Image (cartoon, grey):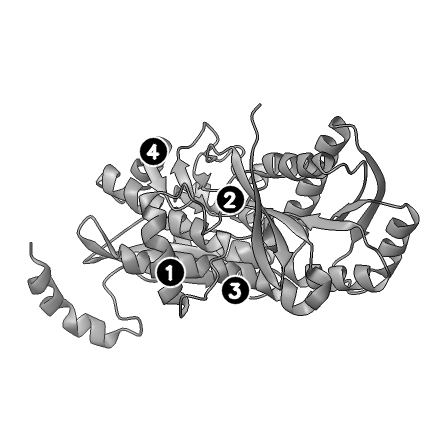
Amino acid sequence: MKRKVMAVLLVAAMAASMLAGCGKSGGGEAGSASGDVIKIGVFEPLTGENGGGGSQEVDGIKYANQVYPEVLGKKVELVVVDNKSDKGEATTAATRLVEQEGVVAVIGSYGSGVSIAAGDIFKNAKVPAMGASCTNPMVTEGNDYYFRTCFLDPFQGTVMANYCTQQGYTKAAIVYQNGDDYSTGLANFFKASFEKAGGTIVSEGVIQTNDSDYNSILTNIKAADAEVIFAPSSITVAGAFIKQARALGIESLICAGDTWENEAIIDVAGEAAEGVVLSTFYDENDASASDEAKKFVPGFKEYLGGDDAIIPAVSALGYDAYCVVIDAIERAGSTDGDAIRQALADTSDFVGVTGAITFDENGDAQKNVAIVKTVEGGEFKYLDTVTVTE
């Protein structure tokens, strides 16, 4: 190959550029690649309500790039943009990736709302996007260019509703964030499954944007004598919500979905977080782990800073999202958006950290297993593995 010769010829250009690299930057055609670099966009919230989870997802993506730094004989350059957990900012960030940075594919985002907001931008530019943990069904609906490596909210809602009814709970309260696609969607799926299983929803509360005092909602829940509270929410809401619930004397089981697997919630809620239950995508101690997972766990712990580091499920999903995109580009033998999209759709034998991944006609990973965890001793502990079959 001519890599050394090419590198010499590019020295002058690199010296004149603020961004050391060979790929197109600014005004480049979306989905292009040049020189020795192929650009992949990382579309994630690094700030705002979902900044904590987005950062964890980015950690997994960056580590995957460290493990697998090349594709088609070229270096993979990650272009990270912050969608700021905001739908308006999401469209700006997505437009930058496809119109200015010339990325050939995109990974992200943590947060279904921002993923939905950016979907048409990726679709119209014919730039394939691979979500890692965006679980709302609307992310991929009607969009041939959006895929994801996680299970969906209808499944997750069923998992948690079944768990609650199996524990003997018959009366539940639901709390969700107004305007948050993830929160409202997951709450509705839980409600449908809980009622189908014979349970009753005795209270419904809505958290408005920028709310920080949840006592009126919690007072209604206490009066309704709810045995369990299902409250899928952002990380910033969760800690304070849990703390205020316990301070009010509410002893009901408090549970939620995957966003709650974040140490920041325990940091805020403290001892009040003990006993909280959530569903998630992955557990590092899974005895049936794949070969990729067995390599990932020690390597990623070292990347995070030591053996005592805890691996968030969204980091594992971010790792898988990167790897499945790289795999598709390699199989496509091209950086053309249509070719990559087709290769992703044809994925059939990919086994990642979170298990085997194939995609259905909507671009959704076909998964039927979830992990249920609880907070015990200030840490997230494995509780159960749940399989749901139609």
Does dot 1 land on a helix, a strand or a loop?
helix
| Numbered label attached to residue 137 | none
| Amino acid type, label 2 | Gly
In this view, the residue in front, 234 or 76, is 234
Q: Which of the marked residues, 1 or 4, is nearer the chain's N terminus?
A: 1
Q: Are marks 1 and 4 in contact (CB under 8 Å)?
A: no
| Numbered label attached to residue 300 | 1
What residue is at 39 percent from the left and 52 percent from the top?
A: 319
Residue 362 in the image: state x and y as whole percent: 48, 31
Classify mark 2: residues with Cα within 10 Å, few (<14), some (14-19) or many (20+).
many
What residue is at 65 percent from the left and 46 percent from the top?
A: 181
Where 173 falls versus 214 (above or below)?
above
Q: In this view, does 39 lie to the left or right of 365?
A: left
Q: Which of marks 4 and 2 is in front?
A: 4
Q: Is residue 68 visible?
A: yes
Classify mark 1: residues with Cα within 10 Å, few (<14), some (14-19) or many (20+).
many
Classify mark 3: residues with Cα within 10 Å, few (<14), some (14-19) or many (20+).
many
Where 103 falls versus 18 (above or below)?
above
Q: How far apart are marks 4 and 2 (CA)?
A: 21 Å
| Numbered label attached to residue 119 | 2
Residue 77 in the image: state x and y as whole percent: 30, 60
Q: How far apart are marks 1 and 4 (CA)?
A: 25 Å
| Amino acid type, label 3 | Leu
Q: Which of marks 2 and 1 is in front?
A: 1
Q: Nearer the viewer, mark 3 or mark 1?
A: 1
Q: How far apart are marks 3 and 1 (CA)?
A: 20 Å
| Amino acid type, label 1 | Phe
Q: Mark 3 points at which residue?
A: 46
Q: Distance between the residues labelled 4 and 3?
A: 30 Å
Q: Is residue 143 left or right of residue 2?
A: right
Q: Mark 4 points at which residue?
A: 347
Give the residue furthest to the right.
Answer: 223
